[in-house]
Image (cartoon, rainbow, N blue to C red):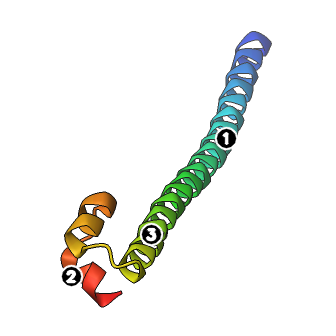
Amino acid sequence: MDNSANKKFEYTLQALQDNKEDLQRLRVEMAESDHKARIRYATDKGREEGKIEGRDERKLEIAKNCKSEGIPFETIAKATGLTLEKIKKL
């Protein structure tokens, strides 16, 4: 191989190595981004579930108080959205 062909070959090899390194960096960045997105999703989902749980607990608390005040179960059910069965079990 002449000197010019040798330099072209070396340049091509270096370009391939650079591309390989770039691809590896991209894979790492994508994995990190995916991991962060999963954590964000899980955090958001946990918050939403916590809010729902808190609302449900509040409804039960209100229903218990209404029941102890002698308010009719049907009225409690309409006000809280709880079933009559659930209210009777309180």
Give x and y (percent) for residue 76. Answer: 29, 68
The answer to whether the residues at label 3 and label 2 have Cβ atoms under 8 Å apart is: no
Residue type for callout 3: Ile
Closer to the camera in the image, 47 or 33: 47
Q: Which corner quadrant of the image does residue 83 belong to?
A: bottom left
As measured in the structure, the alpha-carbon distance from the residue carrying label 3 to the one carrying label 2 is 15 Å
Q: Residues within 10 Å of mark 3 (few under 14, many from 20)?
A: some
Q: What secondary structure is marked by label 3?
A: helix
Q: Residues within 10 Å of mark 1 (few under 14, many from 20)?
A: few
Query: Would you say 76 lies left or right of 37 here?
Result: left
Q: Earlier in the sequence, mark 3 or mark 2?
A: 3
- Indicate the quadrant containing the N terminus: top left, top right, bottom left or bottom right: top right
Give me the disc on residue 29. 1
Q: Which residue is mark 2?
A: 85
Give x and y (percent) for residue 40. Answer: 60, 49
Q: Is residue 14 above or below residue 58?
A: above
Query: Would you say 42 lies left or right of 77 here?
Result: right
Closer to the camera in the image, 21 or 25: 25
| Image depth: mark 1 or mark 3 in front | 3
As measured in the structure, the alpha-carbon distance from the residue carrying label 2 to the one carrying label 1 is 53 Å
Q: Which residue is mark 3?
A: 62
Query: Would you say 61 lies left or right of 26 here?
Result: left
As measured in the structure, the alpha-carbon distance from the residue carrying label 1 to the one carrying label 3 is 49 Å
* Residue shown at 46% from the left, 62% from the top: 55
Q: What secondary structure is marked by label 2?
A: helix
The answer to whether the residues at label 2 and label 1 have Cβ atoms under 8 Å apart is: no
| Image depth: mark 2 or mark 1 in front | 2
Closer to the camera in the image, 23 or 50: 50
| Residue 62 can be seen, yes or no | yes
Q: Which corner quadrant of the image does residue 79 belong to?
A: bottom left
Query: Would you say 32 lies left or right of 61 here?
Result: right
